[in-house]
Amino acid sequence: MYKSLVKKAALALTLVASAAVAQAATFNIGALGNTYTNTVDVQGTFDDTYTFSLPGSFSGVTGGYLGFDFDGSGLNTFLTVGQGTPGAGLMVSLPINTTMGGVDVASYQSTFSLTPGGSYWFKLSGSGDLASYTVTLAPVPEPETYALLLAGLGLMGAVARRRQSK
């Protein structure tokens, strides 16, 4: 009887200790040339770091975050952004925007002007008893890229109009 009780106590202690340990992951995106999307399921406390570099043809990054807390206990999430090696940076609290059917929903979207060719990082940290979040990053082309695109479209329109008049 004591053996069974000791085993149960040891198992309960192991479960409590594993729940108290923070989940941490590092995602190295590399050179951000296309849209990047990652969905992560979290339970308890989490501290996830994303690192990436911005190629010279891009002037910034548009980022989006969408988080769900399925048990309604609240998803407390923070975003920290910086340049170079991950460390101290500007921390922004990501609020819960709405609650639908007992599920808390948090969303955040922003555009950051960044120096082309630089290395950057951001960290999502927080807690949620049973939650999931999705990160989406998309590079923003430099203004010269848009100018070339518009010039090409104008040229194609002129050629089409000329063919139509013949």
Image: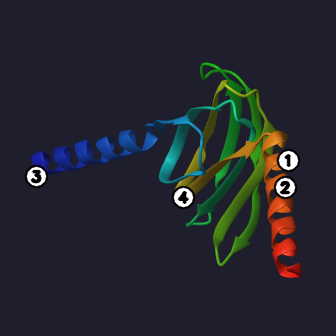
**Which residue does the image show at 76% across and 67% down from the upper left?**
98
Which of marks 4 and 1 precedes in the sequence? 4
Q: Dot 4 corresponds to which residue?
A: 131
Q: In the structure shown, which secondary structural element does the residue marked by tag 4 occupy?
A: strand
Q: In the structure shown, which secondary structural element does the residue marked by tag 2 occupy?
A: helix
Q: In the structure shown, which secondary structural element does the residue marked by tag 1 occupy?
A: helix
Which of marks 2 and 3 precedes in the sequence? 3
Q: Dot 3 corresponds to which residue?
A: 1
The mark closer to the camera, 3 or 2, is 2
Q: CA distance from mark 1 to mark 4?
A: 42 Å
Three-letter code for the amino acid on which mark 3 is drawn: Met
Q: CA distance from mark 3 to mark 4?
A: 39 Å
Q: Is residue 113 left or right of residue 7?
A: right
- Indicate whether 98 appears above or below 3: below
Q: Is residue 40 left or right of residue 13?
A: right
Q: CA distance from mark 3 to mark 2?
A: 80 Å
On the image, the x and y values in percent for residue 133 come to 57, 55
Three-letter code for the amino acid on which mark 1 is drawn: Ala
Q: Dot 2 corresponds to which residue?
A: 150
- Indicate whether 3 appears above or below 163: above
The mark closer to the camera, 3 or 1, is 1
